[in-house]
């Protein structure tokens, strides 16, 4: 969302986050590391929540985007609810102070232990994705003598015009229940013991920069709410999912203004008199994080100049998984002419590439780079591939910085392996 002042900027020739110079930081902290701006998270939250609250919609942050305790605590203190997809995320949200009655539980494969824990915690709502899951929740409610408040996630069969791997609202996707079967499934749910139907849910995909798919899904949901009410079902909560896109590439991404999205909510949903939940992840966190990395080597071949970084696809997977574009900039602009590089990591795969034929201000071995907009789906998707430890994470407020995740030690990492007795 480039139209708003960003906390990651050059001050003269030195890249800063808030009031902290990244060059100064690299003297104290070993790269690679993730760096977050407290003020950017707060600014993003306030912008979304102010626009949405006007149309009776509340922000329930999608924890999968970044589940660090410090980040959840910032959002909790601003009043955010949470959308979780595992027992782990639920525990993280509760531990950070997000109350259970502001947590919804989504996902197609909730296990018995996850459902039981969520029931005992008293969460606001299960977003149910299949008949089998509905039956499972009902059985667990009976045995625990508890009631589950549920919404059915509807698959509206709408094309979200986003990357195929993050499109969720087409009939062929594994998510939700076909919209044509809505009345039947609500009827079925209403008769199951331990189940209290209270809402309806939809989520059509992620990184959506077009308003039309959202409008189509809101229209569909509004029609369904009316039909369900006609049949006597009480629908008090409408969860419209997340998916609001951001600008990773100023030349190609044109995100809509949140006020335009809010107007569509108002036009199609507000008059139904429900509590409306929005589950943004990326639009709260993406611009609030950067990955700081050092150029380990520069390698020239006949056709190419490779920048080999100390960060790899295990630390940040979006470029290799989705061919995602992320801006990459030198921390210090000491040389102003541009050069063209393939910017790669150290992992032993050709897919470990952050950018191909990218023109950036020229750099030297040992220089530091910023990979921008990595606050969402960065650290949460990292892995230990190539036995590389999870990297350090830092949050900045003004000119202060604090570690919010320690670097994993190799001892910790290796000690999880166990030998069979016979070996
Ligand atoms: N609600 C549900 C049910 C979801 O599945 C998701 C994201 C969200 C909300 C939040 O969507 P957002 O506002 O962040 O677009 N790893 C991918 C993105 C996967 C999104 C999965 N679901 C990436 O890096 O692009």
Image (cartoon, rainbow, N blue to C red):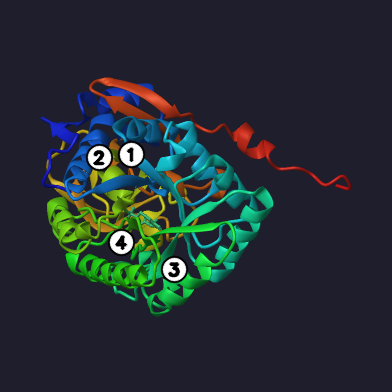
Quarter of the rendered image showing ligand 1:
bottom left
Q: Are marks 3 and 2 in contact (CB under 8 Å)?
A: no
Q: Earlier in the sequence, mark 1 or mark 3?
A: 1
- Spot occupied by residue 396 in the image (x, y as percentages of width and height): 30, 26
Q: Which residue is mark 3?
A: 176
Q: Which residue is mark 2?
A: 45
Q: Are marks 2 and 1 in contact (CB under 8 Å)?
A: yes
Q: Earlier in the sequence, mark 4 or mark 3?
A: 3
Determine the CA span between mark 4 and mark 2.
Answer: 48 Å
Q: Earlier in the sequence, mark 3 or mark 2?
A: 2
**Is 100 placed left or right of 47 in the picture?**
right
Q: Secondary structure at mark 2?
A: helix
At x 35%, y 55%, the residue is 236
Residue 130 seen? no
Q: Are marks 4 and 3 in contact (CB under 8 Å)?
A: no
- Spot occupied by residue 166 in the image (x, y as percentages of width and height): 37, 64
Q: Which mark is residue 302?
A: 4
Q: Quadrant of residue 379?
A: top left
At x 60%, y 65%, the residue is 135
Q: Which mark is residue 80?
A: 1
Determine the CA span between mark 2 and mark 1.
Answer: 8 Å
Determine the CA span between mark 1 and mark 3.
Answer: 25 Å
Tally of numbered tags = 4
At x 32%, y 71%, the residue is 224
Determine the CA span between mark 4 and mark 1.
Answer: 53 Å
């Amino acid at each position: 969302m480039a139209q708003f002042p960003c906390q990651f900027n050059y001050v003269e020739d030195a890249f800063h986050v808030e009031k902290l110079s990244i060059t100064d930081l690299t003297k104290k902290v070993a790269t690679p590391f993730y760096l977050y701006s407290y003020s950017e998270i707060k600014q993003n939250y306030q912008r979304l929540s102010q626009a949405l609250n006007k149309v009776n919609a509340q922000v329930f942050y999608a924890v999968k985007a970044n589940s660090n305790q410090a980040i959840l605590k910032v959002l909790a203190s601003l009043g955010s609810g949470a959308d979780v997809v595992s027992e782990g995320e639920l525990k993280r949200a509760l531990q950070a102070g997000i109350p259970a009655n502001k947590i919804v539980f989504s996902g197609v494969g909730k296990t018995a232990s996850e459902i039981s824990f969520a029931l005992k915690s008293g969460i606001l709502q299960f977003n149910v994705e299949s008949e089998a899951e509905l039956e499972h929740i009902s059985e667990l409610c009976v045995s625990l003598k508890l009631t589950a408040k549920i919404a059915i996630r509807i698959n509206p069969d709408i094309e979200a015009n986003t990357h195929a791997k993050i499109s969720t609202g087409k009939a062929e996707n594994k998510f939700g229940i076909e919209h044509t079967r809505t009345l039947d499934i609500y009827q079925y749910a209403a008769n199951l013991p331990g189940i209290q139907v209270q809402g309806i849910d939809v989520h059509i995909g992620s990184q959506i920069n077009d308003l039309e798919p959202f409008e189509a899904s809101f229209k569909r949901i509004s029609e369904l709410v009316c039909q369900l009410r006609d049949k006597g079902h009480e629908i008090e909560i409408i969860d419209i999912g997340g998916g609001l896109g951001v600008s990773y590439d100023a030349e190609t991404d044109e995100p809509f203004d949140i006020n335009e999205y809010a107007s569509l909510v108002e036009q199609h949903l507000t008059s139904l008199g429900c509590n409306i939940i929005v589950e943004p992840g990326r639009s709260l966190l993406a611009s609030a994080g950067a990955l700081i990395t050092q150029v380990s080597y520069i390698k020239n071949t006949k056709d190419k100049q490779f920048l080999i970084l100390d960060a790899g696809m295990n630390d940040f997977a979006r470029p290799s998984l989705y061919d995602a574009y992320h801006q990459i900039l030198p921390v210090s602009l000491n040389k102003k002419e541009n050069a063209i590089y393939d910017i790669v990591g150290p992992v032993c795969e050709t897919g470990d590439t952050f950018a191909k034929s990218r023109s950036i201000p020229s750099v030297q071995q040992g220089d530091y780079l910023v990979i921008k907009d990595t606050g969402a789906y960065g650290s949460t998707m990292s892995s230990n591939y190539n036995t590389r430890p999870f990297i350090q994470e830092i949050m900045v407020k003004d000119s202060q910085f604090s570690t919010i995740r320690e670097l994993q030690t190799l001892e910790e990492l290796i000690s999880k392996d166990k030998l069979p007795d016979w070996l």
